Image: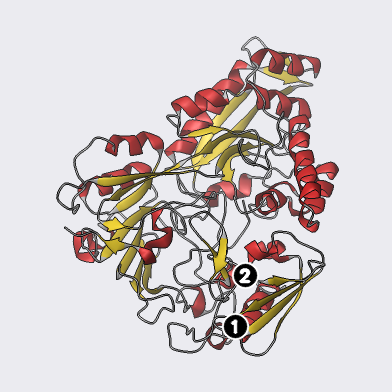
Amino acid sequence: MKARTVRGMAGATAAAVIVTGAAACSNPGGGAAAGAGAADSAVVGIATEPETLSPLLGYGKDGNSKIFDGLLAHDTGMKLKPALAEALPEVSADGLTYTYALRRGVRFSDGQPFGAKDVVFTYRTILDAKTNNASKSELDAIADVTARGEDSVVFTLKYPYAPFAERTVLPIAPEHIAGGQDVNSGEFTTKPVGTGPYVLTAWSKGEKLSFKANPTYWGGEPAVKKFTMAVIKDDDVRATRLRSGELDGAVLPPNLAKGFAAGKALPGAPPGGSRGMYAAKTYDYRQVTLPTDHPVTGDTAVRQALDIAVDRDTMVDKLLDGAGKAAYGPVPTGSPWFTAGTERPHDLGKAERILDDAGWISGADGIRAKNGVRAAFPLWYPSGDKLRQEHALAFASDAKKAGIQVTTESGSWEVIEPRMKTDAVLAGGGSPADPDFDQYLTLNSALAGDGFNNMARYDNPTVDKALLDGRRSADPAVRKAAYDTVQRELVKNPGYVYLTHIDHLYVVADKWDGLTTQVEPHDHGLGTGPWWNVESWKPKQK
């Protein structure tokens, strides 16, 4: 969830960044000629695209950006490992100083050397008030970043911030290029240069991003020489293009992914091979925002009633075909950060009693009203996202049983965003890296109305304090208690109705070795999916 230059909450099945143009109607990348079916090329279908390719404005901030590297990266198990740093950071006893020794001999794809000055430039530029990066609150803990010679960088923090090292997967930009341009509108935003395994060759907005292997990559030149991400907003169209052979792989919602389970081999697969089906466990949730500025959704009783009127288990069974689980908050059940006892079973009778006691009286048509205000509100979802549409319709059906009329509406994010102050939205979010990452942006009252941050304008002083306690302590017990408080407060006063946590499903032609998945965030399709490590893939022998 974010109000970022790379927008969160947006997108279709694979959401976190918004599609700024219509999905291409032409063959993405020209079909097999552009790589689909070729042994050393890959064309994958994703649902969304970034608004910028500059890490200074938010691109790739969670890693796996292809063009860039961070100081650290995540391995398959989501553990931190060195990238542009030669080792994990040295942390002072008080938790206020992080020192990174940098990998030597690394060069940007234009041949210029990478060094400490680039790290300092990147972080200081992001934190500059003039930089339009709404994610800069994620780096709030930084008091200063300085170079210690050419090969060492020191971060000084304002307070002990336990997950700080996770923030240093953020991509590093070259000062010699980006430093000479307007950070918000310069050429670097669409024609980036990095140290990563791939080099951008073309970006046709609304259609595709094309990459070629970086022959001088410090980790070794990738075996997949050409990599194309075809931007296909509509789930059905993405499935059709995968089936026709225009794509080597794609992210799909459960109802479409299961259609590939027993089908014929994808075009281009080796003899005897068909496809790989990959299901990635995630922190990705779907939720309904309950804006405080609406006379119905702003009523605590209505929020409490909706929270237990929804039938989450049926949504998991019917909408996700079992590929997910019920969501009771931003943290999935099974996570060590989940607070036991905050599960809310479906209880329509109790929901009706809450509304009765609060003065929401059922009318002749079954819809409730209070003081002349009808219990009705719109619920928006992004057009083309069938999974969100299905969630919205199921939510509206459950709400109507409790006497609340929800009218579902679809539109682009440009249509939805101006309405978010008063209208509910079928939104999404979630980050496995640390509970601070998603919850602070979603629930902190100071970020209410800040673009896609805190879309519901949730305002709970107890939650605000707990969020600060959780991010400013290095003590695991203190942090666990803080996030327990947040989750219990969401039971008392839900600012959002969390519906499901969704497994991400991918279909990929069985042509390469080395495909794996990570535990994934809300954002999937660009930096996540089986192609999170495409630079490590090796063609299978036919």
Residue at image point 50% right, 49% down: 15
Per the rendering, the mark at residue 416 is none
Question: Gap in Å between the C-alphas at discs 2 and 1?
Answer: 18 Å
> Which-is-in-front pick, marks 2 and 1?
2
Which residue is at the front of the view, 420 or 199?
A: 199
Question: Disc 1 on helix, strand or loop?
Answer: helix
What is the quadrant of residue 129 in the picture? Answer: bottom right
User: Which residue is denoted by mark 2 in the rendering?
Assistant: 88
Q: Position of residue 406 (x, y in %)?
A: 59, 27
| Quadrant for the C terminus in the image | bottom left
Which residue is at the front of the view, 478 or 203?
A: 478
Q: Is residue 111 left or right of residue 327?
A: left
Image height of 269 relative to 179, above or below: above
Tell me if I can see residue 375 in this picture: no
Q: Is residue 300 left or right of residue 53?
A: right
Asked if the residues shown at circle 2 and circle 1 are in contact, with their CB atoms under 8 angstroms apart, the answer is no
| Mark 2 vs 1, N-terminal side | 2
Disc 2 crowd rating (10 Å Cα; few below 14, some 14-19, many 20+) is some
Residue at image point 67% right, 38% down: 338
Task: Name the residue furthest top.
Answer: 364
Residue at image point 77% right, 34% down: 488
Amino acid type at circle 2 is Leu
Q: Position of residue 321 (x, y in %)?
A: 42, 29
Q: Position of residue 445 (x, y in %)?
A: 78, 49
